[in-house]
Image (cartoon, grey):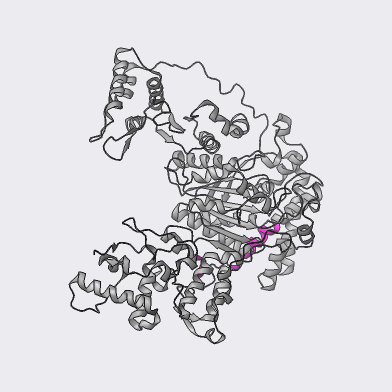
């Protein structure tokens, strides 16, 4: 009977190598199942390599694969305890299954930085240590101290295997040394040290979700950063950096409290309870400048927008006050919009003179609909201003917790993040999680444990962060930015906080959440918590902290005096009539049309067109020569090409728009005999024409229309077209049509 040869051990290389090393030292260290496996493996190695030495070294696990490890003789799923380790994903190159490929709770081993899943039925204490480490890496977030509230909040699930008692260690074992699977700086630590390290790393102010990532390099990179952040050489802020972050959190809190005092009862949608957003975003800009980012594009709802405008984008306080007092030029012109919907442009310059161009997109009260607009703007800047370099233009989206879980446009946007026609190289998402949606509790606003669970569908890592730990929040955003720039993926930061007042400042939240608000009313503000921490550590004195607060209050009062005189909008900015041009020349020379048509019959060498389609295309070119029978699809194609030759870029997107729903367009051709596509109009760019891009979109209307609208706002000489597959499909994009396109 032939033996099925096992082809791939996937992410478990290092575990097998570690087990083999222990086996070579003493077979009793690995238990009978692995002993039998390695004995058979040595026999197979001897047979396949022609060695007469039955105990020949197997070498590295990459060699094990090359020398054909028999899958049928590897420990079975019952022997490895897969059923006790939760959901297991298994696959092999030959389409079969591998009991070794248990990924979700895999953990790093020693210097090899590989992954393994510990067998559950082996009796050794070392195996239980491995299982415990794996559990904390995968599910320690359920035990993390991420919630600044203790009353009236949504409870997280109870998970047995992140409680040390589950493993039934004896007191005598606590001070014995065990391999720690790469945790910490030492190859071995005492069990007591391992337990302490796991709680410090995985159950502190940040809860980590990253073991769902399929890419081993991404998992390992995150694991390194997470587990080394407290070690020497890990994340360390200088004294000056800590003082700067204190200043930013003081400014964030003082901005809200001073507005609350000055404009009693005015709606401003305060950031209080999650003010940590401000030092986080400031840290992100600081790091982005260092990493070579040139432009940052923000999208956010109304919650905290005024604070971000003032303390991140640097919008003058005078102008913000003028909007509160209806003194702004927008009021005189009758814009009809409110101050917490407004956008803004500015620049950020770091201490070394590096400059970032900042833009906050305007957004109506339709929560989350600005998300795809921001992505479209970012993509267009990447395409037209920065040579399609995805790293240098950074989209940053702020969300509310209830809206992130509840609004379908969020998923439509995230689903585009890895699609070639829409990717922007990753987005940093910050969820301003005040654990409430107006008056609705989390239990009533989502079915998932976390508001972020949907994002795991696109392999996005998630950091759940306690807003009262400012420095952990800053570490999280730095790590998120590093991950985005390295791997081009979205990253989610779920900033747990609370809402100090009601949904707006006129609401009484105790009507609906009396228990949690009885706790909130007595809480210290975050600036006070961080100030007391730095005072206790000798970083600042009480007098220095008080001086920062007083400095901001003085700026506030000076701005208040001047607010009627200041605006950055400019006076009389209406453009009615200024863009009117004489009737343009609409004719196109025949030879130019022929140049366009020829791209549909002159194919790259070796490219084979579908025989039926070739007849259609040949007939179209002939119709141009004869001047008879030019169909609508071909006329549209000629129009696109003529614009390109006039240096107007063309981008066409929509469902199935490359071929056309009714098989009428055919601007993207598929190779008839093998994989490959050819875009005839795109070849005009090499002849001095502008670009042509046709994108078969995701099956989405709202997300795609929002993206294309954003894309259209960047480069004036671009024709951006979204095609509704059928006319009433536009209904799915009605918010963008009404609030963005019609209002432009």
Residue 149, compared with residue 191, is above or below; it is: above
Q: Nearer the viewer, residue 403 or 20?
A: 20
Q: Residue at x 64, y 27 (%)?
A: 574
Q: Nearer the viewer, residue 7 or 609?
A: 7
Residue 713 visible within the image: no
Q: Residue at x 55, y 20 (%)?
A: 580
Q: Nearer the viewer, residue 350 or 726?
A: 726
Image x and y of residue 159, in percent: 58, 67
Quarter of the image where the N terminus is located? bottom left
Q: In the shown orientation, is residue 454 left or right of residue 587?
A: right
Residue 240: within the magenta?
yes
Residue 5: within the magenta?
no
The magenta segment is 225-250
Q: In the shown orientation, is residue 372 left or right of residue 337?
A: left
Q: Nearer the viewer, residue 402 or 709?
A: 402
Q: Residue at x 28, y 73 (%)?
A: 41
Image x and y of residue 730, in percent: 55, 30
Quarter of the image where the C terminus is located? top right
Residue 737, compared with residue 577, is above or below; it is: below
């Amino acid at each position: 009977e032939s033996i099925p040869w096992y082809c791939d051990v996937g992410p478990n290389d290092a575990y097998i190598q570690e087990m083999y090393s222990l086996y070579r030292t003493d077979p009793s260290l690995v238990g009978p199942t692995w002993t039998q496996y390695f004995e058979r493996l040595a026999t197979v190695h001897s047979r396949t390599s022609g060695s007469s030495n039955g105990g020949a070294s197997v070498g590295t696990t990459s060699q094990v694969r090359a020398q054909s490890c028999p899958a049928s003789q590897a420990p079975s799923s019952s022997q490895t305890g897969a059923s006790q380790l939760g959901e297991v994903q298994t696959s092999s190159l030959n389409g079969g299954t591998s009991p070794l490929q248990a990924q979700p709770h895999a953990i790093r081993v020693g210097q090899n930085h590989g992954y393994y899943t510990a067998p559950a039925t082996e009796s050794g204490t070392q195996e239980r240590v491995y299982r415990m480490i794996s559990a904390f890496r995968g599910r320690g977030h359920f035990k993390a101290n991420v919630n600044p509230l203790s009353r009236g909040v949504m409870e997280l699930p109870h998970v047995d295997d992140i409680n040390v008692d589950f493993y039934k260690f004896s007191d005598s074992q606590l001070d014995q040394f065990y391999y720690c699977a790469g945790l910490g700086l030492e190859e071995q630590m005492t069990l007591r040290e391992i337990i302490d390290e796991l709680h410090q790393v995985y159950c502190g102010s940040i809860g980590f979700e990253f073991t769902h990532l399929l890419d081993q390099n991404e998992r390992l990179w995150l694991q390194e950063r997470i587990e080394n952040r407290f070690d020497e050489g890990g994340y360390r802020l200088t004294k000056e950096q800590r003082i700067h972050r204190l200043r930013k959190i003081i400014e964030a809190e003082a901005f809200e409290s001073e507005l609350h005092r000055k404009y009693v009862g005015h709606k401003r949608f305060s950031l209080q309870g999650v003010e940590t957003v401000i030092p986080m975003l400031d840290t992100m800009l600081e790091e982005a400048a260092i990493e070579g980012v040139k432009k940052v594009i923000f999208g956010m709802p109304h919650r905290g927008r005024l604070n971000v405008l003032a303390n991140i984008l640097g919008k003058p306080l005078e102008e913000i006050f003028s909007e509160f007092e209806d003194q702004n030029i927008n009021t005189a012109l009758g814009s009809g919009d409110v101050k917490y919907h407004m956008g803004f442009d500015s620049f950020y310059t770091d201490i070394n003179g590096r400059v970032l161009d900042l833009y906050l997109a305007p957004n109506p009260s339709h929560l989350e609909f600005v998300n795809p607009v921001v992505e479209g703007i970012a993509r267009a800047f990447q395409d037209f201003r920065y040579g399609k370099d995805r790293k240098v233009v950074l989209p940053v989206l702020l969300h509310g917790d209830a809206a992130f879980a509840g609004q379908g446009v969020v998923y439509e946007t995230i689903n585009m993040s890895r699609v070639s026609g829409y990717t922007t190289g990753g987005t940093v998402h910050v969820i301003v999680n005040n654990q409430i949606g107006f008056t609705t509790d989390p239990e009533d606003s989502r079915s998932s444990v976390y508001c972020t669970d949907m994002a795991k569908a696109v392999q996005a890592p998630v950091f759940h962060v306690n807003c009262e730990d400012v420095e952990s929040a800053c570490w999280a955003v730095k790590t998120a930015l590093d991950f985005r720039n390295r791997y081009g993926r979205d990253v989610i930061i779920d900033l747990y906080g609370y809402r100090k007042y009601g949904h707006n400042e006129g609401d009484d939240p105790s009507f609906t959440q009396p228990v949690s608000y009885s706790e909130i009313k007595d809480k210290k503000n975050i600036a006070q918590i961080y100030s007391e921490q730095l005072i206790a550590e000798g970083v600042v004195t009480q007098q220095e902290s008080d001086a920062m607060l007083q400095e901001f209050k003085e700026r506030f009062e000076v701005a208040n005096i001047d607010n009627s005189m200041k605006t950055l909008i400019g006076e009389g900015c209406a453009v009615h009539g200024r863009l009117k041009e004489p009737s343009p020349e609409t004719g196109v020379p025949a030879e130019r049309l022929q140049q366009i048509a020829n791209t549909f019959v002159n194919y790259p060498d070796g490219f084979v067109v579908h025989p039926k389609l070739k007849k259609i295309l040949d007939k179209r070119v002939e119709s141009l020569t004869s001047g008879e029978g030019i169909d609508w699809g071909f006329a549209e194609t000629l129009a696109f090409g003529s614009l390109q030759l006039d240096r107007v870029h063309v981008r066409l997107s929509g469902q199935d728009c490359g071929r056309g729903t009714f098989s009428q367009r055919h601007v993207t051709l598929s190779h008839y005999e093998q994989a490959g596509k050819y875009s005839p109009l795109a070849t005009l760019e090499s002849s001095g024409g502008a670009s042509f891009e046709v994108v078969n979109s995701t099956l989405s209307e709202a997300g795609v229309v929002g993206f294309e609208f954003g894309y259209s706002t960047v480069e004036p000489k671009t024709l951006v077209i979204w095609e509704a597959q059928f006319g009433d499909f536009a209904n799915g994009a009605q918010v963008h049509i009404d609030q963005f396109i019609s209002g432009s």
